[in-house]
Amino acid sequence: MPEQADVAKYNSKSDKLHKQWKVDLIGFAFIAPWLIGFLGFIIGPMIASLYFSFTNYDLLSSPTWIGLDNYINMFTNDSRFWQAIKVTFIFVFGSVPLKLAFALFVAMLFNTKRRGVGLYRTLYYVPSILGGSVAIAVVWKQLFGRDGAINDILSLFGIPSVSWVTSPDFALSTLIILVVWQFGSPMLIFLAGLKAIPAELYEAAAVDGASPLHQFIKITIPMLSPVIFFNLVMQTIQGFMAFTQSFLITEGGPMDRTLFYAVYLYEKAFAHFDMGYASALAWILLLICGIFTAFIFRTAKSWVYYESEGGK
Amino acid sequence: MTKKWHYLFFVFVMTGLLVACSSSDSASETDGDSSNKVELRMLWWGSQDRHDRTLEVIDLYMEENPHVTISAEFTGWDGYWEKMATQAAGGNLPDIVQMDYKYLAEYAGKGLLADLNPYVESDALDLSDVEDTYIDGGIIDDKLYAVNIGANAHAIVVDNAMFEEAGIDPLEPGYTWEELKEKAKELSDNLGDNVYGVHPGAGVMGFKHYLRQHDQWLYSEDGTELGYDDDQLLVDYLQITVDMLKSGAAAPPDVFMTAGTNVEQFPIVNEETAIVMDIHSNQITAIESGAGRPLDLMLQPSLEGGELGHYIKPGQFFSVAESSEQQEEAAKFISFFTNNIEANEILNAERGVPIAGAVREHLKENASDAGRKMFEYVELAQEHSREIDPPDPQGSTEIESLFANEVQDPIYYGEVTPEEAAENFRKKASEILAKD
């Protein structure tokens, strides 16, 4: 802040304050566009949706206040809500650990000095750039369709065709495989973390005769734990909010076997115009994400290692 | 200190400007200035093919009426009602909107649609060439809220060449459910591996038809409960599909579920089934072009000693928004859309059979094969029709997804018995209807 130098010239207190005010104000002026966006497009709608969640609102007529009815209905009288919770939990607990393990595995492979490693890194990151996109969902639907490439490959080995996307037994697994395959962004973050681990630790361990597996458990995992922690939180939240895959590939079907929470919320809001109920669902989703994030943060003390804390 | 306020004021003015800039283009000022310019907005759903045809008709209208500008908004069926509800909530419905029978009662009941009767009386909207059968669907409480822009009928699709190949006589109007079961089984047996008689339908559309054949309706008159009392009706209806799946007459769900509602991907397109249940007659064009071979429309199976199940359905409507300041001009366009021969040559009955007599006659003479089949079929269906039931009540979209998720699909996959499905459906549907 160059202004600081100017400020120093002023001796009287009030002048100083005045100057400080001015500096603050300029700061505010600069962040005003974001601030207004935040108030208008995030905080405002959140407050509105909290209000709607206590009403019966169909978009076309004015909301009527019904108190806690939406929330009570949800927990006592809505089997699809529980189905959505079940599916979402299976999805999160199935896809997040797999995705992180896979991302770490690939990051380890890329953490070498081979030629052309940059090109491969880029190639493997591509699916994630296309992550939430419609195109990938469509491709996936084709690949795993009844006449898709996956069945063609399986038939080479004499395995009978499976209708992956429309079979009640396989639909959810197919979606889990899809998100695990989009491992790029946690992979890049892992890669950065791996690069930050001092090489002398491994050298010292090797001198002491530690096997690679041993080194991985005793050095890599602890040194990487802050990064694992970050990825775990981000991916868990993302997992609870997943929407595109189910909406585009299976439309929540067959028989609600892939009814992600977000898809159910969307259906309530825009297919049945039950905006009040959908707002209530949204707040419960926020609560669930909050609880899980808090839980991960709670446990962090016991497994995340920060060098700056002198290694506990 | 005043400097500070200067800054703040500056910030507010700037953001005020930003907000103002971004929200001014939607309100077009038309307060009777000398040039008498009219600007209309119009919204519809449909396929790319429909968009192209409709846009061409709009251009034609604007050529003939240079003072009118029509800006078009269009989407597929998915997302259409979200868009429309959002616009309705924001108080900026387009002047002309395409409307479906399913939502008509809801929108009209909330005072969002204009009564078009005054414009019929003032001849802005000319319906003199239209029979009442085609107009009635758009009337609620003696007010005309919607003009039908294409009639269609419930139908099944058959591939008569496959019947011939299997050495089976084609289905004739008046055939029964039993006959359908037998013939579908024979088709499965006589045609190759992985070819099935029928792509079954255990959906709400077929069930409604089945109820009509029993002189019943899915909803009660006031729309607060189910309209049929005996669960055995639903059990019997579902049993038909269960039997056909069991005997191999019907394709297993793996074969037809992937296509969803996308008719171009139905198994009949690849000659994997010879019959498809439960489509709308105007979909023949899309299915036939997907298949690349001639297919035919046929009536639903009839019930021995039962009532007529068929009715002529307004495939879609045009409505005018109550909030529109150009209601008369909007009505004029709808009139053009309904009666103008040149416009309808472009539209080519893609939305269903046109409602104006002269247009219908003209198109029938010049229709493509698929088009002619549709015209002839709707005439046939009309002979087997009785009056249409009232529009579905509020909450019907929820009832339909309940039926799809907890009745239709589990029946296909054999996860529930018809009895369980019927009982569960009654319980949950009653709750949904009672709360609306």
Image (cartoon, grey):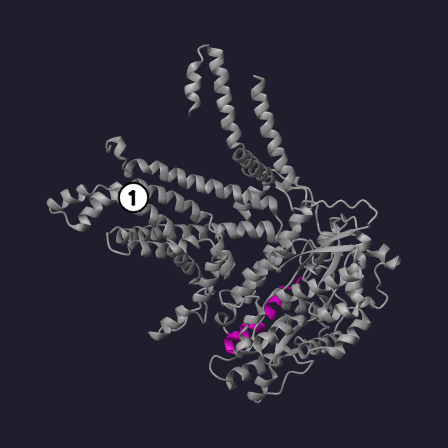
Above or below, B14 against B395 in this view is above
**A113 on left or right of B419:** left
Above or below, B236 against A221 in this view is below
- Residue at 55 percent across and 76 percent down: it is B269
Residue carrying label 1: A193
Q: Nearer the viewer, residue A161 or B70?
A: B70
- Residue at 80 percent across and 57 percent down: it is B331
Q: Nearer the viewer, residue A5 or A186?
A: A5
Query: Can residue B217 be seen in this snapshot?
Result: no
Principal secondary structure, stretch drawn in magenta: helix
Query: Residue B84: x and y, percent?
Result: 66, 52
Residue B65 in the magenta stretch? The answer is no
The three-letter amino acid code for the residue at tag 1 is Gly
**A101 on left or right of A51:** left
Query: Residue A30: x and y, percent?
Result: 51, 31
**Tally of marks:** 1
What is the crowding at mark 1: few (fewer than 14 residues within 10 Å), some, or many (at least 20)? Answer: some
Q: Residue furthest left?
A: A208
Read off the chain for label 1: A
Per the rendered image, the range of residues in magenta is B229-251
What quarter of the picture does the N terminus of chain A occupy? top left
Q: Nearer the viewer, residue B69 or B94?
A: B69
- Residue at 73 percent across and 67 percent down: it is B150
Q: Secondary structure at mark 1?
A: helix
Q: Residue furthest top?
A: A12
Quadrant of the rendered image containing residue A290: top left
**A32 on left or right of B56:** left
Query: Residue A93: x and y, percent?
Result: 38, 50
Above or below, B289 against B403 in this view is below
